[in-house]
Image: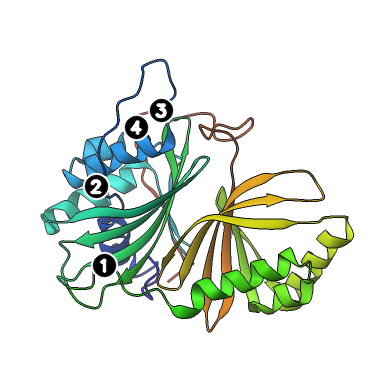
Amino acid sequence: MGSSVGLGSTLCVTLGVALCVTMFACRPARETHASTPTLPDAIVDRQMAAYNRHDVNGLLAGFDDSSGLFLFGEPGVLRTRAAMRSTFAPMFQTYPNVHTETSRRIIVGPFVVDQEQLTGIANGRPTAALAVYEVRNEHLVNYWQTLVEGHARSVPYPAPEPGAASTMARSIAALNQHDAAAAAAAYGDTVVEHSFSSDTAVTVLTRDGMRAKFESMFQRGGRMHVTVENQLVVGSYVASEEHITGLPDGGPVDRLVVVHVADNHIVADWHGQEDDAYGSVAGGTGTIIESQDDREILHAAPP
């Protein structure tokens, strides 16, 4: 999804090809006991299977009318099953051979993060994608994606940008040394911070603002230590499963972090915290809208 094509006047092209074409990858189905809540990755697998057989009804069955489909770094969001149907159905007709596969996967509570490979689109080249699925109460409630084009058929995934993972590692090392200035130095002049559970609400901080944020945390008695359990790098995006101890407000915490790196500096990040094994939270997304009266609502960036 993270192409330079924006939402707005080019929304049909961006969502029809970038977002929808790579939304689900092929993974084996999993059987679960009827009395046991279905795990988030099994929910994603079911959606993926429907996508790869071009089953629009099966694909939409996992969503509700509050579900959001996001492009990393773009302000627009596609909502409601009707809006999704109007995009997926013609896309499957336009690209009858579209297919995706998952190369690697990270699971952090309700978040399933996939490194995916797309084939069957117009340019004929494999395309790499980083996709994040948020699953709560056995429904896919939010989805984020960025695309990175493959350079040739023989290269299914472009090489990760050399500075992406090292920039993330530099920031984490400084945080573990409780060096606020060094940690902030890994960030750009401005940093856009997102929450996965409320992606449309963002905070913009300067590098000095990031330093002040870190200093405040340390001054409150935090002896934070971050351990990266798993990590995916796709182009200039880094997705990390982090285990954090020593927070001033409690812990330990397991969380998902995705950062976008440009010119060896973090310019945007997204955070999502593990709630429990099945991704259900008190006061969270607890009501699934089952109405078939699909209203098409499309919130997009101004042209």
Could you say whether the residue bearing mark 1 is in a helix, strand or loop? strand
Q: How many marks?
A: 4
What x and y, as percent, mark residue 212? 81, 70
Q: Mark 2: give few (<14), some (14-19) or many (20+) Cα within 10 Å.
A: many
Identify the residue position indicated by label 1 in the image. 127
Which residue occupies the foreground of this view, 91 or 148? 148
Which residue occupies the foreground of this view, 265 or 77? 265
What x and y, as percent, mark residue 133? 43, 47
Could you say whether the residue bearing mark 4 is in a helix, strand or loop? loop
Q: Which residue is painted at 30% across and 63% down in the image?
A: 18
Task: Please indicate, yes or no, whether residue 69 appears anywhere in the rendered image.
Answer: no
N-terminal label among 2 and 3: 2
Identify the residue position indicated by label 2 in the image. 26
Marks 1/3 in contact by CB < 8 Å: the verdict is no
**In the rendered image, which quarter is residue 9 located in?**
bottom left
Q: Mark 1: give few (<14), some (14-19) or many (20+) Cα within 10 Å.
A: many
Q: Which residue is painted at 25% across and 63% down in the image?
A: 17
Mark 4 vs mark 3, foreground winner is 3
**In the rendered image, which quarter is residue 299 located in?**
bottom left
N-terminal label among 1 and 3: 3
Q: In the figure, 111 relative to 39: above or below?
A: below
Question: Label 1 vs label 3: CA separation?
Answer: 30 Å
Q: Which residue is painted at 28% across and 57% down in the image?
A: 22
Q: Mark 4: give few (<14), some (14-19) or many (20+) Cα within 10 Å.
A: few
What x and y, as percent, mark residue 222? 82, 55
Residue 94 left/right relative to 14? left
Marks 1/2 in contact by CB < 8 Å: the verdict is no
N-terminal label among 4 and 3: 3
Question: Which numbered tag is attached to residue 293?
Answer: 4
Question: Label 1 vs label 4: CA separation?
Answer: 35 Å
